[in-house]
Amino acid sequence: MEISSNSVLEVLKQVLHPEHGKDIVNLGMVQKLLANDNKIDFTLTFTKVNDPFASSIKKACTRAIEEKFGKDIVLEIKIKANVAPKVESPYKAKASVSRVKNIIAIASGKGGVGKSTISANLAVAVARTGAKVGLIDADIFGPTIPKMFNVEGVQPVMIKEDGMDLIEPVKSFGVKVLSIGFFVQPDNALIWRGPMATSALKQLIHQGAWGDLDYLFIDLPPGTSDIHLTMVQEIKVTGAVIVSTPQDVALSAAIRGVSMFTSESIKIPILGFVENMAWFTPEELPNNKYYIFGKDGCKKLAERMKLPLLGQIPIVQGIREGGDNGNPAALGEGIMAKAFEQLAKNVISQVEIRNQTLPPTNKVEVKQKV
């Protein structure tokens, strides 16, 4: 039997799309059809990614063609998704965050290691160097940054910029701060599904009136989650700082955090580790060190992974009081302030090294398949 494009199309008209109830030819799904001699080649085009009927429609096409032209036919059916391009939001297209020089993720493998305390004090310490600094509290389900900056209950105002309504960050201790905590009651638990949380993060990123910043720190939730993935898809992250305590259970979780950022699909450089709660020091006895959680666990891990140890932060009563009272320890003059001052210098140094030796980070592109 003679094989032609018209004869193949007549056969394919027998194949219906179950969802639309129409044949695939009249739906315009059959494209790039080549039919001659003993070979048939065409592309099935779907209008959405991961169409659940893709596999069954391809099998139905194969069955119909083989019944008509025989099983000796050389048949190749390609599948693609012809999805309309998404129209980028003007907030994302003209986002103020695009004027930030360096975006630094502060992460931890597990909760309870003092990541937000490190984030808050690091941001303050870097701001004290004269740099322009911002901080996003991306711990959507447990925002604590407003309390640490003594701005609980403050409601950011909306401003106009380039015809868009933007959220003006709250400025405290020289740091521009945005947190979901500004928009919910402090005592209310957030019961949100993943898409709601990621949408909130996108708004903080793209609708924040960040202006020209040298550093924007992002305090992430513990572990790895949709929040982390949303961040790397939305913005170009300069590098990540991993916070851990010295004990083995925290270190094993920190390794997973490093693995996520350095994975082939994400490729965000690790600027280094911060060992929090490295030892306990009574403020009245600054030379005394008590290794409650073990000694140098994070330091040894950094050496093993050939990554910088950015700082070792001791446990001092003042750091807890500062966090509870909204008065960051980095503002003082004692051993904690000096520890955070050194941490800030080390982070700035590692950012400079990273920018001199590595290309800019790309946003993670989601590859869609039918």
Image: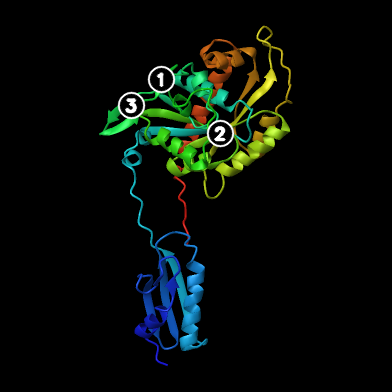
Locate the N terminus and report the quarter of the image it occupies. Answer: bottom left
Could you tell me which secondary element the residue under label 1 belongs to?
A: strand
Left/right of residue 32 with respect to residue 345 in the rendered view: left
Give the color scheme: rainbow, by chain, secondary structure or one colour: rainbow
Which of the two residues, 231 or 265, is positioned nearer the viewer here? 231
Q: Amino acid at mark 3?
A: Met
Asked whether, in this view, residue 21 is left or right of residue 316, the answer is left
Mark earlier in primary sequence (1, 3): 3
Image coordinates of residue 83 in percent, x first then y, are: 38, 59
Rendering coords of residue 201 (x, y %): 45, 36
Q: CA distance from mark 1 to mark 2?
A: 22 Å
| Residue pointed to by mark 3 | 158
Residue 258 higher or lower than 30, as above or below = above
What crowding class fits label 2: few (fewer than 14 Cα within 10 Å), some (14-19), or many (20 or more)? many
Q: Amino acid at mark 1?
A: Lys
Q: Residue at the spot x=67%, y=23% of the render?
A: 278
- Calculate the distance from the C-alpha at mark 3 to the C-alpha at mark 2: 26 Å
Q: Is residue 364 left or right of residue 163?
A: right
Disc 1 versus disc 3: distance between alpha carbons? 14 Å
Q: Residue at x 56, y 26 (%)?
A: 116
Q: Which residue is mark 2?
A: 221
Residue that badge 1 annotates: 171
The mark found on residue 72 in the picture is: none
In this rendering, the answer to whether 84 lies above or below 255 is below
Q: Quadrant of residue 319?
A: top right
Residue depicted at 34% across the width and 73% down the height:
26
Nearer mark to the viewer, of 3 and 2: 3
